[in-house]
Amino acid sequence: MRNKEDLKTVRKTVLMTAETAKDIEREAEERGIKPNAVMNDRLRHSKNDNTPPVTMQFQDYANEAVRMMKKYNEDDAEYLERKANLLWTF
């Protein structure tokens, strides 16, 4: 299957500040993706802070909490795990 980036067919020119461009390039380098992918990601999630990197961080916290709770109360741990899984719905 083709890469999702290869499926994009519409090109638009966007003017931005040098600071914004540097921020996008820095984030792209950190995440190992193209700046175009960062811009698309930010646009898709502009009204929702639940971006994939943030969701992964929440999931890591939830996984740690579930591990800690499981030895005291398995039912509550499973409940927290189910609630954390809802974060993956964008």
Image (cartoon, rainbow, N blue to C red):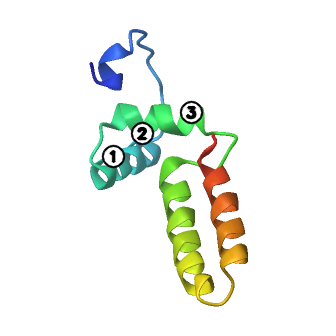
Please say if the residues under marks 1 and 2 sit with CB atoms less than 8 Å apart. Answer: yes
Disc 2 target residue? 38
Residue 79, placed above or below residue 74: above
The amino acid on which the numbered mark 1 sits, given as a three-letter code, is Ala
- Is residue 17 shown above or below 58? above
Q: Residue at x 53, y 80 (%)?
A: 67
Provide residue 59's location: percent of width, then percent of height. Answer: 54, 63
Q: At 33% from the left edge and 46% from the top edge, which residue is drawn? A: 28
In this rendering, position of residue 73 left or right of residue 6: right
Q: Nearer the viewer, residue 63 or 26?
A: 63
Q: Nearer the viewer, residue 56 or 42?
A: 56
Q: Inspect this view and state whether residue 16 appears.
A: no
Local secondary structure at mark 2: helix
Query: 60 and 32: which one is in front?
Result: 60
Horizontal arrangement in the rendering, residue 75 relative to residue 19 (left or right): right
The amino acid type of the residue labelled 3 equals Leu
Q: What is the spatial separation of the Cα atoms under label 1 and label 2, in whole angstroms? A: 6 Å
Name the residue located 59 percent from the left edge and 79 percent from the top edge. 65
The residue indicated by pointer 1 is: 28
Q: Where 85 falls versus 9 (above or below)? A: below
Quadrant of residue 84 within the rendered picture: bottom right
